[in-house]
Structure formats: C-alpha cells, structure tokens
Image (cartoon, rainbow, N blue to C red):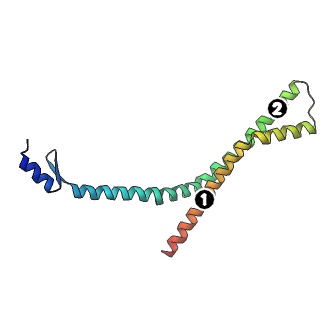
C-alpha cells in the first residue's frame, strides 16, 4: 500500500502507477489524440475513397446484376399473371397483355427506385474519385 505522500507525488507528476508500471497521462493523452485523428482521417478520407473504388470496380457489376434481377422478377410475375388468366379460361389478347404490363410497371416501382439509388451511389463514387485524382495532380 502506498503512503499518502507517495500518492500525492504520483498525482503531481501527472503519472499513474498501474501494475508496477508508471504511465504518463500526457503520453496517454497524446496517444488518444493521435488515435482519434487517425479514426477521423479514415472516416472522412479513406473510407469514401475505398467506397468509390469499390463502386468503380465491383459496384457496376452489382448494378448490372440488380438490373437483371428486376427484369427476371418482372418476367416471372408476367408469367404468373398470364398463367392465372389462362387457368381461369380467359383469353389472352393484346389488351390483356397491355393491362398486365401496366400492372407490372406499378408493382416494380420499388425495384426501380432501388436501381436509381444504386446508380446514384455509383455516380457519387465516381465523382469523388475524379475530384480526388484532380486534387492529387494539383498537390
């Protein structure tokens, strides 16, 4: 157990005794400040750049996949609607096909919104990369 005088001396020297090791609070503050600065740098600079690179290299394929998934979903739903009409003994003519297409357009609005959002993400990533490349050239 430390004496009161020893504790007072430890606090005055801005240090902490921990498991037999003297830790300087100023050093710890500097290390913490450095880590916080690194985290901010990663969040504000490196992460957006990595996301931009990801979108440029891989995101375009994800977008194409999403487009194909939307088209596949639309065709499957069209087959389902037309099969139901045929099973009920109804005739399928041009007016029915147009009505089915209109219904599918209404149903797939949320998929199209998703595609639009993804396309905007890709464009934003590309703008970020282009602005960073221009800034690097000037630097």
**Residue on which the image places disc 1:** 124
Lower sequence index among marks 2 and 1: 2
Residue 36 vs 92, above or below: the answer is below
Give neighbour class at mark 2: few <14, some 14-19, many 20+ (Cα, 10 Å): some
Asked if the residue under mark 1 is in contact with the one under mark 2, i.e. CB atoms within 8 Å, the reply is: no
- The quadrant in which residue 27 appears is bottom left
Q: Is residue 87 left or right of residue 125?
A: right
Of the two numbered discs 2 and 1 in the rendering, the one whose residue sits closer to the viewer: 1
Residue 16 vs 83, above or below: the answer is below
Residue lying furthest bottom: 138
Residue occupying the point 56% across, 63% down: 129
Q: Position of residue 117 (x, y in %)?
A: 65, 50
Q: CA distance from mark 2 to mark 1?
A: 38 Å
Q: Nearer the viewer, residue 32 or 72?
A: 32
Point out which mark residue 137 bears: none
Residue 1 vs 135, above or below: the answer is above
- How many numbered marks are there? 2
Residue occupying the point 88% across, 24% down: 88
Q: Is residue 76 left or right of residue 125?
A: right
**Residue on which the image places disc 2:** 81
Secondary structure beneath label 1:
helix
Q: Position of residue 40 (x, y in %)?
A: 42, 57
Q: Give the quadrant of the N terminus.
A: top left
Secondary structure beneath label 2:
helix
- The quadrant in which residue 3 appears is top left
């Amino acid at each position: 157990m430390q004496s009161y005088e020893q504790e007072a001396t430890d606090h005055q020297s801005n240090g902490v005794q921990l498991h037999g090791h003297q830790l300087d609070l100023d050093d710890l503050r500097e290390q913490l400040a450095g880590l916080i600065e690194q985290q901010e740098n990663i969040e504000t600079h490196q992460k957006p750049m990595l996301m931009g690179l990801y979108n440029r290299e891989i995101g375009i394929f994800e977008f194409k996949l999403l487009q194909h998934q939307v088209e596949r979903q639309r065709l499957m739903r069209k087959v389902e609607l037309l099969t139901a009409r045929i099973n009920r003994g109804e005739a399928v003519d041009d007016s029915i096909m147009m009505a089915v297409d209109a219904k599918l357009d209404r149903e797939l609005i949320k998929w199209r919104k998703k595609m639009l959002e993804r396309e905007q993400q890709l464009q934003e990533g590309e703008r970020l990369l282009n602005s960073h490349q221009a800034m690097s050239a000037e630097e």
